[in-house]
Structure formats: C-alpha cells, structure tokens
Image (cartoon, rainbow, N blue to C red):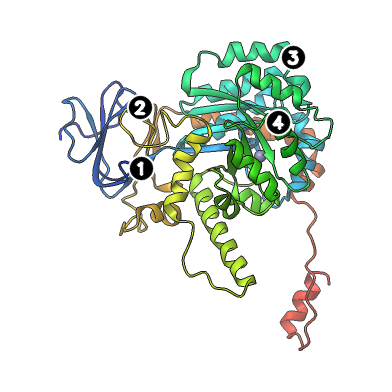
Amino acid sequence: MSQNAAVNNNSFPSGRPVIFRNATVLTIDPSLGMIENGDVLVVDNRIASVGRQLVAPENAMEIDAKGGILMPGMVDTHRHMWQTALRGYGADWTLTNYFQFYYLNWGKIFRPEDIYAGNLLSAIEAVDAGVTTTVDWSHGLQTVEHADAAVDALEAVPGRFVLAYGNLLGAPWEWTKAPEFADFIRRRIDGRGDMLGMQLAFDVTGDPAFPEKAAFEVARDFNLPVTTHAGVRGATNDNGIRLMHEHGFMTPSTIYVHAATLSEDSYHRIAATGGYTSVSTESEQNAGQGYSPTWLLRRHNIPVSLSMDTSVWWSADLFSAMRATLSADRGREHLEAHRRDETVMLSHLRAEQVVNWATLGGAQALDMASFIGSITAGKKADLVLIKNDYSPVMFPLLHPYGHIVFQAGRGDVHTVMVDGKVLKYDHQLLGIDLNRARQAIAKTVEYARSKMGEQAWNEGMNPEKAEVEFIENPYTYTERGKAAQKQSGQ
Ligand SMILES: [Zn+2]
C-alpha cells in the first residue's frame, strides 16, 4: 500500500503496472458482468487481470477506486471534431441553418490551421470526458493540407482516433481518386496501428446514376469502412440505401449515421447486411434529422453505437448521449402506446444496454472489439474511473448502470487511461497542453469572425426566430396571457 498513486509535475509515473482497487467494475464483458469491490491490473498497455483482491506486482501504482465505477473507455462513432473551433455557436440552429452555414456559406473559409485548432480542442475534450476512442467525421478536408492538419492534432493528444476522411465541398468520386489522397494514406495512416484508424466519410444523395459508386470502389480497394449520414430528413433517404444495397456496398463495416428517417425496407436491408448505426440523439432531436431511432432499431435487431455529432451545438460527452438516448427511446415507447390508448407497464430499453452501446457497441461498430470495448484480460487498457468524493451525487451507488446514465456527468470522470497510459488523474488532465488549444482556438475564432464580417457572424449565430402561433382559446385569456401574446408579435 506504499505505492499509492502520486502525481508529480503533472504526469503519472509511467512504465509501471497500475492497479485499480475496490471499484464497482462494469466489465461489459458478458462472461464477467459487474464486479463489486473489484480490482483491475494493467501491465504495459494491456489489462492483465480482472477480479477481487488481486495480487499486484511489487512496483505497481495503486489507484484507490473505492466509491467509484470503473468502466471501459467510451467510444464515439461520429463527431465532426473540426467544428469544435466554434463551440456552441449553433446552439439555436436547425439542420437547415447548419447546412447554410457550413455547406453553402462558410465551410470554405476554414484553413488547415482552423481544422487543427478544432480537432485539438475536441481531442482533449474527448479524453477529458472519458471518450477514449473517437471517430473524427472530418468533412472539412478541402485539401490534403487540411487532412494533414487534422491528423497533426489527433497525434498531439494520446487518445485513440479514427479519421473518417471527408470533404463537404467536393464530390467523393473525385477527391478519393486524387493521387495525393492515396499518398496521404501511405504517409499518415499506414503503420499507425490501432491508435489511428481510417474510414471514408461521404453521403449518398440518391441520384439514380449513383455517382458515389466510384468512391465505394476506392474504399474497397483501400479496405476502408464507409461511414455515411443515412436517413437524414431533407438530405439522404431510402434511395441511397437501396442503391448501396443493389451495388453490393452495404457491408458489416458500413456505419449509418442517424438512420432516423428510413422505411421498414431500408432497416431490413441494414439488418440483413450487418452494418452498424451511429445514433446522435441530441443532434437528431435538436437539428431534425429525424426522431432518434433506437426504438425502431431494437425491433429490427440492428446494432447501435452512440455519438455526439458536433460541438457547434452540444458538448461532446457520452453521458449526455446515453441520457438523451434512453430518454428518447422511452419517450417514444410511451407516446406510441398512448396513441393506442395503452400504458407502458415495463421499460424495454435498460440503462445497462445504453452503457453497452457507449462502450462495446462503439468498439464493435469500428471492428475494434477484439482489443477494446470491455474490461477483459488481454485487451488494451482503455479505462475510465467515475469517482467524485466531493459530489453529493456519487452515493448511494445502488444501480451502477443507471448511475452512469442518469446520475453521473463528465465532472465525475476521475481517471482516464488510454492504451495503458494515465491521461487524467484525480480530475486533472496530465501532460496535455490545454493552453496550446486555447491559443489556436482564439486565432480561429478571430479569423472566422473577421472573414465573415460582424453582421454575418451575428446573423449566423442568431437565426431568425420562428413565431409561436397561439391556439385559439374558447375561454378568455388572462391579462398576462394577452401581454405574452403581444410580446411575441401575434
Ligand atoms: Zn454528422
């Protein structure tokens, strides 16, 4: 017990085994389940053993996890990390406002250094919140210099990342064919092992000519999974799914983001070809891609992973994703039942399932479950300790899965380990330069604001407000009601 973890000079002693002691361990491994008063020993970058009162090597560092929950690192399968540069700017947007801003007007002004700034801050945010693996759905890559900048940022933070290469300003059948694209894969991705993966990110418009075919062929040639916004009201629909299916491009590695407004037939095609969905409930509910679809996906036996989409609206922590997803699923079950004049007597979706989606589900979606996603001996050590001795919300700890989903938050993330390295301990990031991100972000915000001009900047952030139409009331409105009506311009 003399080896209690001590942090000096903002770093955790490296090269020594680490043992987490006395945690409620949510292994997410079906054969192990939950272990109370559990220990997890990490040697080098792997989980060496999981159990109770483990014997640790003499030189092991001990992390006192009593009162806390130890879980696998969370996995976000869809996040536009570059957009973190304008964190919160789009709080009042719809999807239409988003498209107008990035696709039609201002996406083109983002320079490589702006991609770098957004990615750097987003990568730090991910690690801080216990998201140990993040897919960077990077559709701001107008040039390979932008892509280099994206990867530079991902390499500056020792989390696990997957670059989903995209370009919202270009045609995927063109940019995937460019020689510099193939060269980029050789230079930046090949040989990086499991810390930096790659996917191809593009959408399928439903054009009967199926021009995306060439991009799918490139993906197949390079053995890259395709991740695509599917079932997004006003953007992509069943035609895209049908074309992909008819041409043989729906595979177990395909990820369907949102999958919110699709027909039964499209869900059947997804289920039959083994792909994964990435559900971003906060996004679907605010932006309007469609209703968060897990209540339907469960019935179709389509596997689910979770995501936060973009910090231009929401913070990128999966506590929010889990809570929003469970609430949306149950809310829909109730609504559907009430429409039939029935009452839901038992909840279908359980907190445990949602924690599973946020961890193992994400790992499976990315074909990484052989080495992350659960606390299993032999897997890479990507671990999160939820523990906060200063919080009135951390006790009593009666239903640990429910506690994660409905009680805990990012402020309760005590320790984060990725690939066996402690990147956060006792609520403090270690060896991560937040100031560098702060300075880079400040430059990007200043640049974007001056490039757009004050008027466009303000109008972009504050889109015109939809008017509230008061419902005709057969009784008489009170004076207060009349005043409110007047104020809203009715
Ligand atoms: Zn998206």
Q: Residue at x 68, y 23 (%)?
A: 112
Amino acid type at mark 1: Pro
Mark with earlier residue (3, 1): 1
Give neighbour class at mark 4: few <14, some 14-19, many 20+ (Cα, 10 Å): many
Q: Is residue 79 visible?
A: no
Mark with earlier residue (4, 1): 1
Camera-side mark, 2 or 1: 1
Q: Residue at x 60, y 46 (%)?
A: 280
CA separation, marks 2 and 3?
38 Å
Q: Is residue 37 visible?
A: yes
Label 1, on which residue? Answer: 30
Residues at badges 2 and 4 in contact (C-beta under 8 Å)? no
Label 4, on which residue? Answer: 202
Relative vertical location of residue 172 with respect to residue 222 in this rendering, above or below: below
Label 2, on which residue? Answer: 420
CA separation, marks 4 and 1?
34 Å
Residues at badges 4 and 3 in contact (C-beta under 8 Å)? no
The circle on residue 178 is 3
Amino acid type at mark 3: Ala
Residue 391, horizontal then vertical, whole percent: 36, 54
Give neighbour class at mark 2: few <14, some 14-19, many 20+ (Cα, 10 Å): many
Kind of element beneath mark 1: loop
